[in-house]
Image: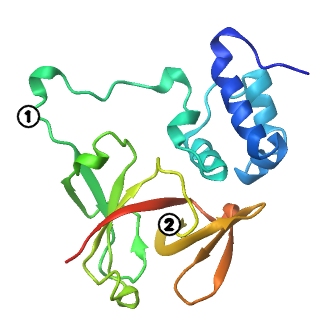
Amino acid sequence: MKMVMDGADVHRQSVLALIRTKSTLKAASIACGRNHGYFHQYLFQSKPRFLPEDVRIKLAQYLGIAENRLREPELFVSIDPPATQQSEVRARLMVYGRGSEPGIDMTAPVAEIDCPPSLLRVVDAFAAYIHDPELGPWLPVGSLIYIDPSKPLRPADFVLVKSGRTGRIAIYRGRTADGIVVDTGNGRDESVQLATLTGFWKIVSVEFP
């Protein structure tokens, strides 16, 4: 059997094992919107040297694991502030969602807030305002949802599904060969192809107005 390169590529051995426990290299490549041989080239030829962020996110979602498990060791950096700044530095969280549309406009942040303790170490965490009256009463207008992209998704989790520049709230039902199944609140499950998505992430908490 062909082996992934040794030494500095121990990480690739781990990625290969993760993919093979749930899928094939070809299926994973297609699910991430790449050519059939993409992950074979990455694992066996080191092309590319580092997985692009969008590929890491899609592969993590496809495998149901935290995205940071797919980061090459060289990309990890310490996020602990210097000891002298521990009491002074407070992380900020970007907030999306303009009030002009029922969907969540994710073109650009509309505000910044103090990051809750549970998300301080989640680099890609963000929040969004709810303006869609159809989501009431369980998510009334003015609610603030918190997103943790590092959390794996399980059936019945609430998710934020992003297509293009707009996000919508749904209940995650599971995966298909080339996409995901969600319930957007109309009582029917909807299949969404990965190729049409720019992201889907777990909602971990809500602040009500």
The residue under label 2 is 157
141 above or below 95? below
- Give the left or right position of residue 157, taking residue 25 as reference: left
130 above or below 186? above
Residue 35 lies, in percent from the top left, at 81, 45
- Give the left or right position of residue 39, taking residue 167 as reference: right
Depth check: 68 or 50 in front?
Answer: 68
Graded by Cα atoms within 10 Å as few (under 14), some (14 to 19) or many (20 or more), the crowding at tag 1 reads few
Q: Which mark is residue 88?
A: 1
The local secondary structure at tag 2 comes to loop
Residue 122 lies, in percent from the top left, at 36, 43
**Residue, x 81% and y 49% (percent of image)?**
27
What residue occupies the far right of the structure in this picture?
Answer: 1
What residue occupies the far top of the structure in this picture?
Answer: 7
Q: Quadrant of the C terminus?
A: bottom left
135 above or below 148? below
**Circles 2, 1 touching at the beta carbon (< 8 Å):** no
Q: Indicate the colouring scheme.
A: rainbow
Q: Amino acid at mark 1?
A: Glu
Q: Amino acid at mark 2?
A: Asp
Q: Disc 2 to disc 1, how far (Cα)?
A: 35 Å
Q: Quadrant of the N terminus?
A: top right
The local secondary structure at tag 1 comes to loop
Q: Quadrant of residue 183?
A: bottom right
